[in-house]
Amino acid sequence: MSTLKLFDVHTHTQFAAFKDEIDVVIKRALDAGIWLVNVGTQRDTSAKAVEIANKYSEGVYATVGLHPIHTEKSFHDEKELGALVFSNSRELENKNLPGFLSRAEEFDYEYYKKLAEDPKVVAIGECGLDYYRTKNLELRTKQFDTFKKQIELAVELKKPLMIHCRNAFEDLIDILQTTNYKLKSGIIHFFSGTVEDARKLLDLGFSFSFGGVITFTRDYDEVVKYMPLERILLETDAPYVAPVPYRGKRNEPLYVVEVAKKIAELKAVAPGDIERITTENALKIFGIKNDRD
Ligand SMILES: [Zn+2]
């Protein structure tokens, strides 16, 4: 295994998109000095993330949790998924992507607690709030309650939170303002809020992970420039949202290199410093020791 160089703090190599290539994709990352965290989104993807992490002596970790979109039954159509992956509509039409039906799941505290006690589990999530599709107050309340239970679990096990938030920053900040004092720490993944949201979340002690999207839109430039490097982490969110120059392809942890380059450009800092600082941030937040350093 190569020396640790970069940390992809939020990826999903356990997802169906990788089928029987999971080990190949992970090996490609490890050979390039990239460590990774497979993030669970419901029961089976959480269990699989833990199982994969335990196949490796170092460099592969897991989180377990219930994603807000999986608290309700919903159909994710090809257009929306495709919009994340492909850069223009013509590309999208040619791909003929299938949609998928996401089943509703209740958060089973004991089930997730048992999984989370595994030493390879470095955070609870991805959990949080996603109001993008959910206009219904009852369903939003269900997301809110499910998120609260996962905050409780993170507090009980003294692990950080891996947070997903879309179109719900006001409620997210509200809930974290009343609970964050008990929390170890947390990462807001794929941050899409405003600079003002970022300021409040920084005050509460949270960190932020950025992925491929920053390489092809300018929407995140201001917020990346605003954030202190000590609070920035890198992610791919693979198989989704591959960075330039891999747009339209299946994303994978190896491509986190492109995200690091873009952060270096936006921050006007040497790429080597971005690699070192974001990797240190990841080891610190997850409480991982890199014995060979
Ligand atoms: Zn994710």
Image: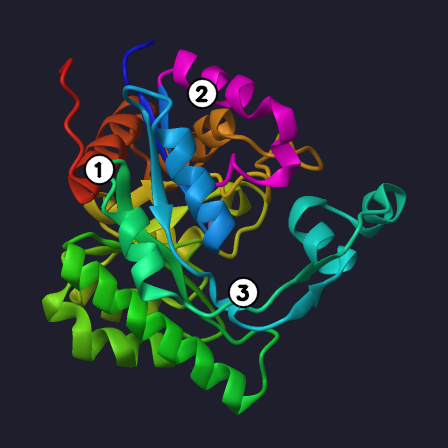
Asked if residue 95 shows in the view, the reply is yes
Task: Name the residue located 21 percent from the left edge and 37 percent from the top edge.
Answer: 119
Instruction: Magenta stretch: give its range.
Output: 12-33
SS at badge 3: helix
Disc number for residue 29: 2
* Sequence-first tag of 3 and 1: 3
Q: Which residue is mark 1?
A: 119
Work out whether mark 2 precedes mark 1 in sequence or the reverse, and give the earlier one: 2
User: Circle 2: is it few (<14), some (14-19), or many (20+) Cα within 10 Å?
Assistant: many
In-image side of 270 versus 15 (left or right): left
Residues under labels 2 and 3: Cα distance? 29 Å
Marks 3 and 1, how far apart at CA: 25 Å
Residue 247: say if magenta: no
- Residue occupying the point 28% across, 51% down: 114
Secondary structure of the residue carrying numbered label 1: loop
Q: Which residue is mark 3?
A: 70
Q: Residue furthest bottom?
A: 137
Q: Residue at x 31, y 20 (%)?
A: 5
Furthest-left residue in this view? 181
Is there any visible trace of residue 205 in the rendered image?
no
Q: Position of residue 54 (x, y in %)?
A: 34, 28
First in residue order: circle 2 vs circle 3: 2
Number of marks drawn: 3
Mark 2 or mark 3, whichever is nearer to me: 3
Q: Mark 2: which amino acid?
A: Ala
- Seen in the image, is 94 located left or right of residue 291? right
Q: What predominant SS class does the magenta segment belong to? A: helix
Report x, y in % for residue 30. 40, 17
Give the percent coordinates (x, y) of residue 214: 50, 46
Report whether the residue tagged 2 is closer than 8 Å to ligand 1: no
- 11 to 43, vertically: above or below: above
